[in-house]
Structures are given as structure tokens and as C-alpha cells.
Image (cartoon, helix red, strand yellow):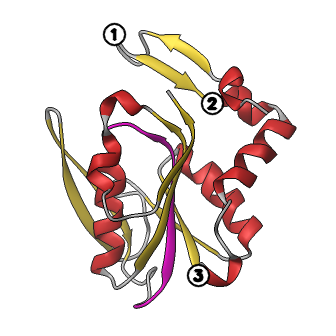
Amino acid sequence: MDLNELLRDVPDFPKPGIVFKDITPILADGKAFREAVDRTVEGLAPDDVDAVVGVEARGFIFAAAASYKLGCGLLIVRKPGKLPAATVSESYALEYGTDTLEIHRDAVRPGMRLVLIDDLLATGGTLAATARLVERLGGKVVGIRFLIELTFLAGRSKLKGYDVRSIIKV
């Protein structure tokens, strides 16, 4: 199945000059969504993964389905102030300014084998920060997965040393 055919380009969203890659047609098609999840977990053995880490917000969709498929735990990384218990944070540079991500302080146990999942790889900053965050807590990143990779932004270069895979490359 060619999932790329189901992506919808939305010009000038969220601001002029951006072409947003809308994944909702893939989510709305049960066979396509199943295919996307199955391909996300390809090469991952349930015995080799302790938890999947989903990144806010669309990454939660694929991470939850992948953790179910693998039969492992689901951890979530959110923007500041969204998690109820004690957190640790990691800030990272954006083109103009910085952003911060948080995870519960007790979410990652030392030695946990983690797969990080988000819907889109653009510049790589979000997942590089997520990897640093979980590694600071003692986790081991055994894979990073995306539905879509915007290859022209070269975000993969910020994730060197990791097993990075994406399903759709544009």
C-alpha cells in the first residue's frame, strides 16, 4: 500500500509558506492505519523493547498503537506543565528561540530499552531532545521511528548513531 497517496498537503498551514502534511486521511482509513502501524514496528522484536515513547501530540497516536502491537509499555513526552507528577525537562534550539519537553521523572528506569516514535521528522530537534531526555534517566534508545520524513530538511543528521526509520520520505 502506498501511504504517501493518502497524505494530504495543506498549503499555508499553520502559516504562509508551510505545506502541512496532513495524516488524518491515513488515520481515517483502517487498512492504511494498520499498515502504517505494522510498518512502524517492523524490525522490532517484542522481547527487545521495554516501552515505546510517544512525543506530543500526533506521535501519541502511533506510539500507542505500536506499544499495543509490541505488548510493551507506553511513555509520553509532553510540553511543559502538561504532566501531573514530578518531571525532568530538556530544552532544545529552534530556528528562532527554544522549546522544552518533559517526561515524568519516574517513567524511565535505568537500562530500559526504548523506541521513540513521532509522526514527522523535520529538522530532528524534537527527537534529538527526546533521546537526550530519556538517556539522562538511564534509558537506552533502541530505535526511532517516524511515519513521514521531510528529507530536504536533513533532520536525520541530528539523530546519528540511532536506528532511524521512516515509512514515507518526501
For the N terminus, the quadrant is top right
Kind of residue at disc 2: Ile
Q: Is residue 67 magenta?
A: no
In terms of secondary structure, what is the magenta stretch mainly? strand
- Give the Cα separation between the discs numbered 2 and 3: 27 Å
The residue shown at (70%, 21%) is 5
Disc 2 target residue: 23
Classify mark 3: helix, strand or loop: loop
Name the N-terminal-most of marks 1 and 3. 1
Quarter-of-image position of residue 168: top right
Task: Count residues near mark 1 (Cα–Cα under 10 Å), then give few for <14, some for 14-19, many for 20+.
Answer: few
* Spatial CA span between label 1 and label 3: 40 Å
Residue under pointer 3: 50
Q: Who's the residue at 79% across and 37% down the image?
A: 32
Range of magenta residues: 110-123
Q: CA distance from mark 2 to mark 1?
A: 19 Å
Q: Residue furthest left?
A: 97
